[in-house]
Image: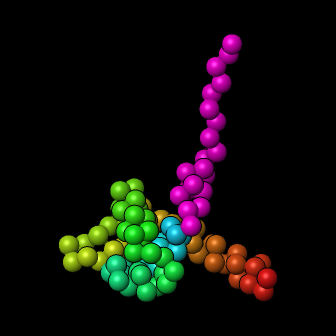
Amino acid sequence: MTRRTKHTCPITKVITLLSDRWTMFIMSALIEEPKRFSELEKWLEQISSRTLTLKLKKLVEEGFVQKSDSGVYSLTKKGQGLRIVVRAMKKYNDLYLRFQ
């Protein structure tokens, strides 16, 4: 029996991260400007406090978001790197999906 080498597409991690229901919305909110938890709740009207807490905790743990001592969430350098992806997705929407 031969052992197979697991092949992973280079964008699998990014797709996995961004495919979560709320992650892209949170990242989009923070790309505009840093926000407090309450501001994120208002910006993301339909998210529960618990879900937002869990998602922010995960993003902080993964190094995409940081929380200041004053309770403000902002993107880290790693998180800011996703600006290109978010802008590309918005541009794609404007060009191809806007009127659907």
Q: Horizontal and vertical percent for residue 6? A: 62, 32
Residue under the image location 32 percent in, 81 percent down: 36
Residue 24 appears anywhere in the view? yes
Using the image as rendered, state which of residue 56 and residue 46 is in the foreground.
46
- Furthest-left residue in this view: 69
Quarter-of-image position of residue 19: bottom right
Question: Magenta region's main secondary structure?
Answer: loop
Residue under the image location 32 percent in, 67 percent down: 66
**Residue 36 sits above or below residue 79 on the image:** below
Magenta span of residues: 1-21
Q: Is residue 45 left or right of residue 11?
A: left
Question: How is this picture coloured?
Answer: rainbow
Is residue 12 highlighted in magenta?
A: yes
Q: State the quadrant of the C terminus.
A: bottom right
Q: Horizontal and vertical percent for residue 47? A: 48, 76
Q: Is residue 8 left or right of residue 51?
A: right
Q: Is residue 63 left or right of residue 89?
A: left
Q: Horizontal and vertical percent for residue 63? A: 37, 58
Is residue 55 highlighted in magenta?
A: no
Using the image as rendered, state which of residue 74 and residue 55 is in the foreground.
55
Using the image as rendered, state which of residue 30 and residue 51 is in the foreground.
51
Residue under the image location 35 percent in, 73 percent down: 74
Residue under the image location 39 percent in, 69 percent down: 50
- Furthest-top residue in this view: 1
How many marks overall? Answer: 0
Q: State the quadrant of the N terminus.
A: top right
Residue 33 appears anywhere in the view? no
Using the image as rendered, state which of residue 77 and residue 70 is in the foreground.
70
Quarter-of-image position of residue 61: bottom left
Quarter-of-image position of residue 55: bottom left
**Residue 55 sits above or below residue 2 on the image:** below
